[in-house]
Amino acid sequence: MSAVTDTTDGPIEVIQVLFALHPGFGAQELCGPLEVLSKALHKINDPKTKAFEITIAAPSAGVSSSSGLTIKADIDFATAHEDVSEYDVLIIPGGDGVNKVLETQSEPLSLISAFAKLQISDPSKERTLMSIGTGSLLFAQSGILQGLAATTHPDYYTKMEIICKEAARKGDLEQTDVMEENYVVNNARYELGENLEENPFVLSKRPDARRKSIARKGSNAWKESVKRRESNARRASLRLGGLRLITSGGITSGLDASLYLVAAMVSHESAQEVARVMQYTWNKGVTVEGIDV
């Protein structure tokens, strides 16, 4: 499944992204991030250096959004489970259909759990799990947010807290910090750099005293981090085996979180170029945990 782009500087492996859709997903919660990632390039002036390759999984050949948009799936969930180790990023859009998924305990719940468990068993690979809007409720239901921070659509903060508390009761009693933020990143990767003031991911200290933290920059730097043995050991010591976990709020928050993902896995320059092309102002979120890898 791995795709490789050849450049004058040598091959750059394309980052594999899997979108997992459920009936009643939010159309814009899919299309916004999809547009951002499809426009990202490792070299902004070279259209041959696409950064991401997208695959869509769904329970059937065609799946409809809450607004009636029907999307053709590339694979079903059975295949997604078989190939889960091939993906670097798993994205879960929210939407009205999330409530049905919670009621029936259906996909993509088991796929989310499988992806998270894969990172715990094999921290040698850098993986990212991201939700858009109410997709984070499925993370909460899966029990993977315990001990971490997360956000969701503002209308669902209370429901998120209830689900997280129930997951903690069934698990090891660790609570989830539900934050009223644009997007929240756990287990970020970053390079310190020589001048922190010039790093676009540095955040001022928040009222809750969270420390400053930054995300790693640099085209294809994500690929380099998995090669270093010490990075793997430090990643394994983090929750979920160092799985980068991103939750975002409403529709535009999904755009912002996707631009963060581009900046973290490709380059800040690439993210800025995508935002410029889309005529969109990128609003930053919160990074609550990171390691210098």
Image: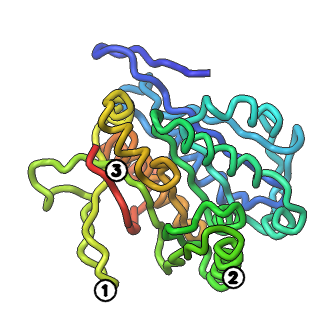
Name the residue located 46 percent from the left edge and 39 percent from the top edge. 126
| Mark 1 or mark 3, whichever is nearer to me | 1
Residue 64 point in image, percent of width and height:
85, 53
Report crowding for label 1: few under 14, some 14 to 19, many 20 or more residues within 10 A (C-alpha): few
Callout 3 amino acid = Gln
| Residue 87, disc | none
Disc 1: which residue: 207
* Location of the C terminus (image quadrant): top left
Residue occupying the point 54% across, 78% down: 178
Q: Residues within 10 Å of mark 3 (few under 14, many from 20)?
A: many
Percent x, y of residue 83: 70, 29
Comparing labels 2 and 3, the label whose residue is closer to the camera: 2
Q: CA distance from mark 2 to mark 1?
A: 24 Å
In front: mark 2 or mark 1?
2
204 over 25 or under it: above or below: below
Q: How many marks?
A: 3
Determine if residue 43 is in view: no
Residue 162's label in the rendered image is: 2
The residue that appears at 73% across and 61% down in the rendered structure is 26
Quarter occupied by residue 80: top right
